[in-house]
Image (cartoon, rainbow, N blue to C red):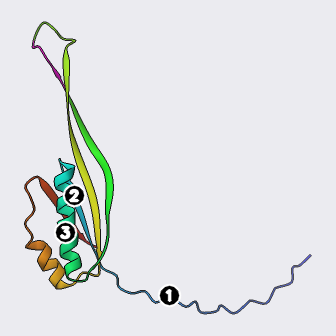
C-alpha cells in the first residue's frame, strides 16, 4: 500500500515580539549585621529613586552561616568544644534601564564599613 502524499501547508512567517533592549544593573549587597545592611539598601534605593529609576527589590537572599568548632583545651579535655558562627546577610536589588546619572550617583555613594557590593550589568 502506498501512502498518498499530503499537500504541504505554507509556513506562515512568525512575528517576533518587539524585544526592547532592557539593561539591568544588578546589585548584590552583603553584610554581617542586618541593621547596617538594611540602612545601606535603603540608601541605595533612595539614590536610585531620586533619579527616577525603576527599582525592583530589595529581595532577601538566604543567610549564609559559617560555623567553626574549636577545642576548648589543648591537651586533656578533647570532648570540650566551643562553636562560633558568622552570619552573612544578603539582599538583591535590580535597577531597570539605569541612566548615566544613576550609575554615577551609585559609584560616588559612601557606604558603612562591613558592607560589600557586587554590581553587574546585565
| Residue 89 within the segment the image draws in magenta | no
State the quadrant of the N terminus. bottom right
Task: Give whichever of discs 3 and 2 has the lower sequence position.
Answer: 2
Q: To which residue does mark 1 refer?
A: 17
Which residue in the structure is indicated by mark 2? 38
Q: Are marks 1 and 2 in contact (CB under 8 Å)?
A: no
For label 2, the crowd category at 10 Å Cα-Cα, with few meaning under 14, some 14 to 19 and many 20 or more, is some
Label 3: how many residues lie within 10 Å, few (<14), some (14-19) or many (20+)?
many
Q: Is residue 68 above or below residue 30?
A: above
Q: Quadrant of residue 67?
A: top left
Q: Which mark is residue 111?
A: none
Q: Which residue shows up at 12% across the image and 79% down it?
A: 104
**Residue at image coords 19%, 18%:** 81
Question: Which residue, given by chain and number where applicable, does mark 3 sit on?
Answer: 44
Could you tell whether 117 is left or right of 53 in the image? left
Of the two numbered discs 3 and 1 in the rendering, the one whose residue sits closer to the viewer? 3
Task: Please tell me which residue lies in front, 118 or 7.
Answer: 118
Element at badge 1? loop
Q: Is residue 53 left or right of residue 7?
A: left
| Residue in the image at 24% along x and 81% along y | 98
Residue stretch in magenta: 69-74
- Labels 3 and 1 touching (C-beta < 8 A): no
Amino acid at each position: 500500500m502506498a501512502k498518498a502524499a499530503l499537500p504541504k501547508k505554507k509556513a506562515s512567517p512568525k512575528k517576533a515580539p518587539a524585544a526592547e533592549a532592557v539593561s539591568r544593573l544588578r546589585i548584590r549587597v552583603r553584610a554581617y549585621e542586618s541593621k547596617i545592611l538594611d540602612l545601606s539598601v535603603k540608601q541605595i534605593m533612595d539614590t536610585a529613586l531620586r533619579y527616577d529609576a525603576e527599582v525592583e527589590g530589595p529581595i532577601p537572599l538566604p543567610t549564609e552561616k559559617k560555623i567553626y568548632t574549636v577545642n576548648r583545651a589543648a591537651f586533656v579535655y578533647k570532648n570540650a568544644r566551643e562553636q562560633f558562627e558568622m552570619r552573612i546577610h544578603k539582599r538583591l536589588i535590580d535597577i531597570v534601564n539605569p541612566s548615566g546619572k544613576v550609575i554615577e550617583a551609585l559609584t560616588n555613594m559612601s557606604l558603612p564599613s562591613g558592607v560589600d557590593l557586587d554590581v553587574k550589568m546585565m
